[in-house]
């Protein structure tokens, strides 16, 4: 991933984490202290009425949902993450983790995303990766206003169709959007 331009140490001109107003053009990272997450304060240019804080988990959820929308993506995450996800599916009262297989680095105005997937067999992987990039970039930029500098796609495995699961047309691979 690219190096983030966000500093975890506020400058002397930066507002304290509780202050709501800033005239400084660069906002500091705010360490929330919960589970090591950092929220990055982002102020839109030309708006002195406040700041918008977008947590890393928000960007990760958007990227996870956008990735799952692409035909040809069987699952997200590496082996360990998928095993934990399968266990979570059997525990009553838990929901699926949409950030599984997604890592983000959020700066003041930019973000970078790493996506780990399992591809369906028969899908051209280079086209699948490009479709994921387009969808993730579009979703994040539209919903957050952050510029996506890169989307790195790692294909961990290829899912082979089960002999028991009938497909509509075995000669046709799954469609990539």
Image (spheres, rainbow, N blue to C red):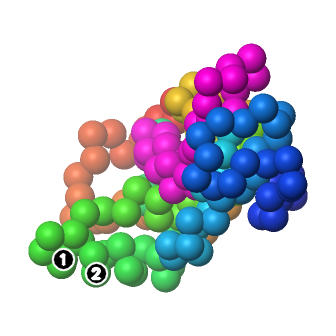
**Residue nearest the observer in this picture, 152 or 52:** 52
Residue at x-position 43% and y-position 39%: 69
Q: Please say whether residue 119 is visible from this viewpoint.
A: no
Q: Is residue 75 above or below residue 134?
A: below
Residue 98 is left or right of residue 151, and the answer is left
Identify the residue shown where x is 82% and y is 36%: 24
Residue 66 painted magenta:
yes
Query: Image quadrant for the N terminus?
Result: bottom right
Give the residue pinned by disc 2. Answer: 87
| Contact (Cβ within 8 Å) of mark 1 with mark 2 | yes
Q: Position of residue 34 (x, y in %)?
A: 50, 73
Q: In the displayed structure, would residue 96 be above or below residue 73?
A: below
Q: Is residue 63 left or right of residue 112?
A: left
Q: Which secondary structure, mark 1?
A: helix
Q: Position of residue 19 (x, y in %)?
A: 62, 46
In depth, the one of 55 and 175 nearer the eye is: 55
Q: Which residues are magenta?
A: 43-69
**Image coords of residue 159 (percent x, y):** 46, 63
Residue 172 pos. (x, y %): 43, 38
| Residue depicted at 49% across the width and 43% down the height | 62
Instruction: Decide: few, some or many residues near mark 1? Use Cα within 10 Å; few <14, some 14-19, many ≥20.
Output: few
Mark sitting on residue 90 = 1
Quarter of the image for residue 160 reads bottom left
- Residue at image point 47% right, 59% down: 99
């Amino acid at each position: 991933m690219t190096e983030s331009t966000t500093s975890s140490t506020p400058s002397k001109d930066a507002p304290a984490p509780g202050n709501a107003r800033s005239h400084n053009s660069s906002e500091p990272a705010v360490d929330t202290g919960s589970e090591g997450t950092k929220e990055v304060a982002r102020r839109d240019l030309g708006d002195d009425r406040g700041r918008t804080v977008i947590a890393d988990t928000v960007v990760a959820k958007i990227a996870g949902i956008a990735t799952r929308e692409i035909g040809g993506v069987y699952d997200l995450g590496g082996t360990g993450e998928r095993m934990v996800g399968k266990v979570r599916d059997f525990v009553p009262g838990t929901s699926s983790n949409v950030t599984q297989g997604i890592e983000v680095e959020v700066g003041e105005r930019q973000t970078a995303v790493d996506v780990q997937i399992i591809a369906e067999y028969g899908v051209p992987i280079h086209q699948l990766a490009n479709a994921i990039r387009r969808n993730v970039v579009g979703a994040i930029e539209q919903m957050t206003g952050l510029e996506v500098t890169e989307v790195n796609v790692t294909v961990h495995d290829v899912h082979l169709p089960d002999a028991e699961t009938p497909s509509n047309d075995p000669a046709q691979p799954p469609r990539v959007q």
